[in-house]
Image: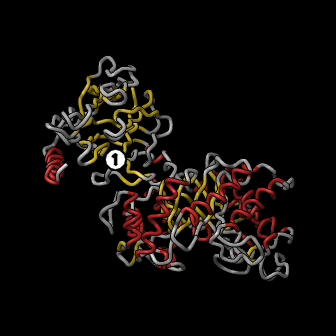
Amino acid sequence: MSVIARVSIALLFIVGIAAGAQAQQMDFGGMYGMGGTPPGTYFNNPATNAPSCPAGYTAYQVLGTSNVDWPAFWCGRPHVSGVDPLFDFGGTYAYSSSTAQGAVPWKGYNAYVNPFTHTDTCPPGYSSSQVLGTPNVDNTLYFCYRPHQASGPSMTFGGMTGDGLPPYPNPATGTSYTCPQGYMRYSAYGTPGVDYAIFYCGIAVDASSVKAGDGSLGVGEPFVSNTIVNNWGLQDQINGILSLHPRVVRMWMLNWQEFSGISAGVVQPNPANLALYQQSVDQLVRAGVTVVGMDNSYPSWMTGSSTTADSASIPCPGSGAPYTTFLANWQATWKAQALAFPGIAQWEIGNELNGARTLLPIQTGAGSCGKTTFNYADRLRISLDLMYWGDRGVKAGNPGATVYMPAAAPVTADDIASNDPSLNGIARYLGDIYRAIAANGALSTNKRDYFDGANWHPYIAQDATMSTWVATNQAVHDVLAINGDGGIPVLLSEDGYTTPNTLASQQAMLDTINLTQTNLPWVRYLIWFRAFANSPDPEYAILLGFPFQQTLSSQVFCQFTGCSNLPYRQY
């Protein structure tokens, strides 16, 4: 499509809305299109198992210019209040040879992603049906549908419109390229020079109930803590994060800020800080972002240490009552977290517990043991205890939540815990976790009593290649598979580079994302660390300064998420 044609489409769309196009909801009755083998056959409409519309529905052509496109049709009828449609519409997904019209890089190609999952999949409970896609001729297009239900995610349907000679108007407005007032226009299909464009109009309903699809890209940042500790503007940070269009945000949910203490097993809220966290979670969820909550804080009111704020000091495992009291407080705090934030259904219970200085022994009082650091065996036991009691806490507050093990740091599996970009230390640590669970008759030998998903931080400190990235992470995943967990969800909840505004880091990010999408299909979310330049790790930021400015790395991030007008783009 020429630049003039694209500009004309945009102007027509604006004019149509400005003219007050008459709003009309339509019922969706499926789609069908020409293609396949042999040429001239059709992809049938699942409503009729034929290239036709169900009774009472009208066929509307949306694509098909002679010598350019195969024809495609959708079935619709004006919506009548109280009359159920045949299908619920769940959006579409399609592939493209170009990103020029809104497709994003995906698994080595480009995709118009589904607006609910933001991947090339349908929302849960929906089926996909092919409309177009003849090998070596055009790209594939799928729509998502289910028999009508009164609840759950769906797209209030406002018709379709397509490009062509001449364009195909939307019957809901009577004009081309326009949507009824209040409806959003979604790009469904199109490659310049190959396929004309298709658009559909909809209002996403209950989209926040659909978690990000597998393979989604995210970003992590303790942005509420940035506000509480450093007085950064909270809304500015939320806008900055949303400007990147992440599908996932890993959010530091720090209990020492949200709560003020615990009494008789009841966690006491800090109302002002808790409100900041709730505001942030609510706004992200409304924007269609899946929030992964992580907490790695151990305040004195939880541990009994002599510090007055957040601390890395906990009672020694062999200290008796001080340690068991700490674990009970840990469980109660996780229950309070899960209850306070029902919009978060995925939790990380701790962070980098295999690191040498992540947790330290209390030095004085009943919880001390004469040690200044925990050895590897201590850290292994503490890991199991925190996973078991943390999982119980989360599930008590939200039985349907997914609990991930604390992310393993890329360090050696020994007392010293040296940096280990080979990730061999992570693999050994996870293997030791499984062996320790199998032998832990005192708590439980059931893996699901400790975690639902695995999690590690694959910092390799070099460019991602098949050997440095794919092979190393696959070796860690092999440990899961050997222990019967090859199918559990996996987070790579932190990855990043210390120099985000260099060509080397830009290339490394590009290679990391591409190789993950094409070679590590078991990754649920790849989460980049971090969004902003702030202590203690300002060198990792992919947005710099204030107001936030893009970097070479943020430009790559945006290629995969579809953001285009940094520094700010609000949903």
> Which of 359 and 230 lies nearest the eye of the viewer?
359
Q: What amino acid is found at the position of numbered circle 1 in the picture?
A: Ser
Res. 27 in view: no
- Vertical position of residue 147 compared to residue 152: above or below: above
Measured as percent of width and height from the top left, residue 517 is found at 49, 54
Residue 85, picture quadrant: top left
> Which quadrant of the structure image shows residue 91?
top left
**Extreme residue toward the top, this view:** 55
Question: Which of the pair 256/66 is nearer the observer?
Answer: 66
At 58% from the left and 70% from the top, the residue drawn is: 459
Tell me where residue 236 appears, x and y as whole percent. 38, 69
Q: Secondary structure at mark 1?
A: strand
Looking at the image, residue 561 sits to the left or right of residue 200; the answer is right
Residue under the point 71% across and 72% down = 412
Can you give x and y, in whole percent of width and height, for residue 2 in the image? 17, 51
The residue wearing badge 1 is 96
> Tell me, what colour scheme is on the image?
secondary structure
Q: Closer to the camera, 375 or 56? A: 375
Residue plotted at (37% across, 37% down):
135
In screen coordinates, is 106 left or right of 305? left
**Mark 1, residues whose alpha carbon is within 10 Å: few (<14), some, or many (≥20)?**
many
Q: Is residue 73 above or below residue 341?
A: above
Which of the image's four quarters has the C terminus?
Answer: bottom left
Relative horizontal placement of residue 176, taking residue 305 as reference (left or right): left
Residue 251: x %, y % from top left: 53, 63
Q: Can you see residue 146?
A: yes
Total tally of numbered discs in the picture? 1
446 above or below 548? above
Question: Toward the viewer: 211 or 365?
Answer: 211
